[in-house]
Image (spheres, rainbow, N blue to C red):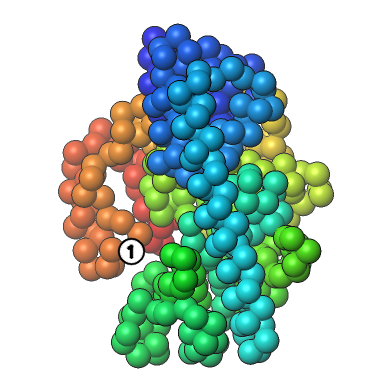
Amino acid sequence: MRGECGTRELLPQLLLGGDLGARDCVSVLAERQAWDEAVQCADAWNVTPRLVSQISRLKLDVPQAPSSELRRHFAEAYRSSAFLASRGIAAIRHLEAGGVRVAAFQGLASIARLGDGPKGRTMDVVDLLISEKDLERAVWRLEENGFRRQVFAGLRQHAALSERKAIALTGSGESRIDLHWGVGKGLGVAEILERAEVARLWDQKFPVVSPEDALLLSARHAACEDLQIESVCQDLIDIQFWLAHLTREGRLDSLAGRAAGAGMTPLVLAITQIIEGYDSASEILASLSPAASARELRESASLVELYRVQLHDGPLGRDRPGPCQSSAKRPSALARVLRKLRPGRLRAIRALARIKYG
């Protein structure tokens, strides 16, 4: 580790690892005088609260200058996330009062159910899930609540043309809501809303997606971000917590079944293996992998390799098709990237493409 890993490789070990691995990373950061870089990385990756939590839990000594900067980032992240969470909960209540069935996922769901509220997780957007049939009514209710859409074409036309199946609305104080009516192949909105559970934050109750669905949605987001650490570190942290939650409640079998039904078994296995690579004390992978086919196991191994290669070498190709790129452009953009890669990495990219684009 000491001779090869840069700060972007060490930081995930500190954030996701068990005590021994995390402390080893800390000693390397100290030797290299790299704490300033680690603090800036955590801020850029939106994982400052997790870094603060690990430093506190492990009782680590951080030099004064980066420690002061870390406290500043943490205070800013807390203020922003707390404000956005309050706006999101108010928006949910307004939607429900108008007869719109809704559930929070990603940031707001994680803040409410996984940790120490906004102190434990950064959030820069409220992700809400609704049925497509409720889109017009939901947008109207949110606009009534002070939000403004960023798309001014007809909503039905937007719904028909949008590949992302979401619309952004902004409100006061730079608050933003992403209203989703679709979340990817194999994940049915109606079923997810039917399985939604009640969460509590600041004595406010509101609906969030189930833990199994929350994990799958975080995994889908990680895939759409091509498993690049800069974009998916928070997803990995969330998934680590969701896996622990599901283990405590005896719901890993439910997760495995739901992942299989959505065609996401390779992705879930890959992310679980990535996480367990940082914390070898976990045995969750052993509970999830027996039901996987040989092909799924090969695909998951390829995805793990893709993550590790990018962690070490940086993102593979800046002209890769993104999650919002049109389907007409995806094949040619993907082909340009594939021609540049070695065979082992080709298999990884193809496995990721199958999950992202079907």
Q: Could you tell whether 350 is left or right of 174 in the image?
A: left
Q: Could you tell whether 289 is left or right of 33 in the image?
A: right
Quarter of image, res 16: top right
Question: Circle 1 — which element?
Answer: loop
Residue 163: x and y, percent?
A: 36, 72
Quarter of image, res 330: bottom left
Which residue is found at the position 39% from the left and 37% from the top? Answer: 306
- Viewer-side residue, 354 vs 325: 325
- Residue 276: in sight, yes or no? no
For the image, the number of numbered tags is: 1
Residue 128: x and y, percent?
A: 56, 70
Q: Could you tell whether 61 is left or right of 282 in the image?
A: left
Which residue is found at the position 63% from the left and 46% from the top? Answer: 119
Against 79, residue 272 (above or below) is above
Q: Which of the image's four quarters has the C terminus?
A: bottom left
Amino acid under disc 1? Cys
Q: Could you tell whether 269 is left or right of 322 in the image?
A: right
- Viewer-side residue, 208 vs 352: 208
Q: What residue sits right under mark 1 in the picture?
A: 324
Residue 256: x and y, percent?
A: 67, 51
- Viewer-side residue, 87 vs 318: 87
Which residue is found at the position 28% from the left and 67% from the top? Answer: 327
- Residue 332: in sight, yes or no? yes
Which residue is found at the position 51% from the left and 26% from the top? Answer: 67
Against 20, residue 95 (above or below) is below
Against 327, residue 33 (above or below) is above
Residue 214: x and y, percent?
A: 62, 58
Against 215, residue 28 (above or below) is above
Dot 1 surroundings within 10 Å: few (below 14), some, or many (20 or more)?
A: few
